[in-house]
Amino acid sequence: MAQPLPRPLEGLAAIVTGAGRGLGRAEALELARLGASVVVNDFGQPGRDGSGEASATPAEEVAAEIRAAGGQAVAHLGDVADHEQARGLVQLAVDTYGKLDILVNNAGILRDRMIFSMSEGEWDSVIHVHLKGHFNTTHFASVHWRERSKAAGAPVYGRIVNTSSEAFLAGSAGQPNYAAAKGGIVGLTTSSALALGKYGVTANVICPRARTRMTEDVFAGYQEPGAGELDALAPEHVAPLVGYLASPAAAGVNGQLLVVHGGMVAVVERPKVAAKFDTAKEVFSYEELDEVLSPYYAGRPDGETFAAAEVLGLKRG
């Protein structure tokens, strides 16, 4: 007799933002498979730059897919970058399932441009959706958990999984807005981890690598799958890590940054001091800094940046 599949998220309620397509969809399906009841959020605009008419269809289709598989899910059409709509998203989870236990922030847009060509609007819109969107939902979820913890007089169950990018880690010349937003999300996550730990809440951040509508041009020509093969860049490689971080098994994982793709998970350490120089006098002079820093950097390869292929760890097809 076949053994029942483990359902470590049974009885837990989750929100996944940007869950109508791509990574968010795969994550919502995985949380539901593991037993969670899911609020599927997606603003439903067809353009990856946030353009086009908003539509409930993407979120509703994913919610229907979860229900068809025997799970529980409701759809939410809302812009997480709007403070009040984010409040409504968290309230929907509480009203529908009685509580919120898991928040997965994934929603985002792209408006790529080199720094010298980028407009104020292109900068603001990406920061707005990614960074403010993560803040909005995290804020209202944290209010919910803090109030529950105070009422219970004990820690409660809470999990936050945020989405950053290797554009933050390695740089991305044509994405200064996106890289800055993703760096900000890491800072938001580590701060939240410290603030919410005493209430029983963990906050972690992933840098996923996947072929989606957002990244179709980035990964064009890289490792196209053969017939019947799972794409090495499929979102399904990322979703299990989100499920793990949302689970009771990850209770001791907090404030962490993990890179995930194609069967690989890498734990990223916080920045370390690479070198240290002390002045021979009371304060540094320009001349002394030139004497110690210029030789140091002269012997290093271009700030130790990485070629794109090395960062991606991929080979072109």
Image: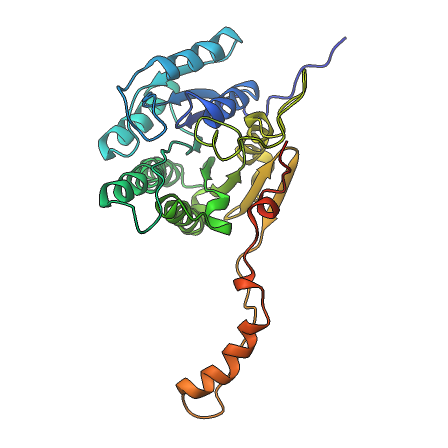
Q: Is residue 2 visible?
A: yes
Q: Is 59 left or right of 243, judged from the image as shown?
A: left
On-image quarter of the C terminus = top right
In the rendered image, the vertical position of residue 34 relative to residue 66, given as above or below: below
Choose top left, top right, bottom left or bottom right for residue 299: bottom right
Residue extending farthest bottom: 281
Please tell me which residue is depicted at 57% across the width and 22% down the height of the picture.
34
Please tell me which residue is depicted at 38% across the width and 37% down the height of the picture.
145
Please tell me which residue is depicted at 37% across the width and 45% down the height of the picture.
181
Q: Measuring from the top left, give residue 69's x and y in whole percent.
A: 53, 9
Looking at the picture, tell me which residue is in the foreground, 174 or 106. 174
Q: Is 244 left or right of 168, judged from the image as shown?
A: right
Looking at the picture, tell me which residue is in the foreground, 204 or 309. 309
Choose top left, top right, bottom left or bottom right for residue 108: top left
In the rendered image, the vertical position of residue 76 relative to residue 312, given as above or below: above
State the scheme by which the image is colored.
rainbow
Q: Is 79 left or right of 160, judged from the image as shown?
A: left
Q: Measuring from the top left, give residue 209's x and y in whole percent.
A: 54, 36
Q: Measuring from the top left, give residue 312's x and y in whole percent.
A: 58, 42
Please tell me which residue is depicted at 56% across the width and 32% down the height of the picture.
247
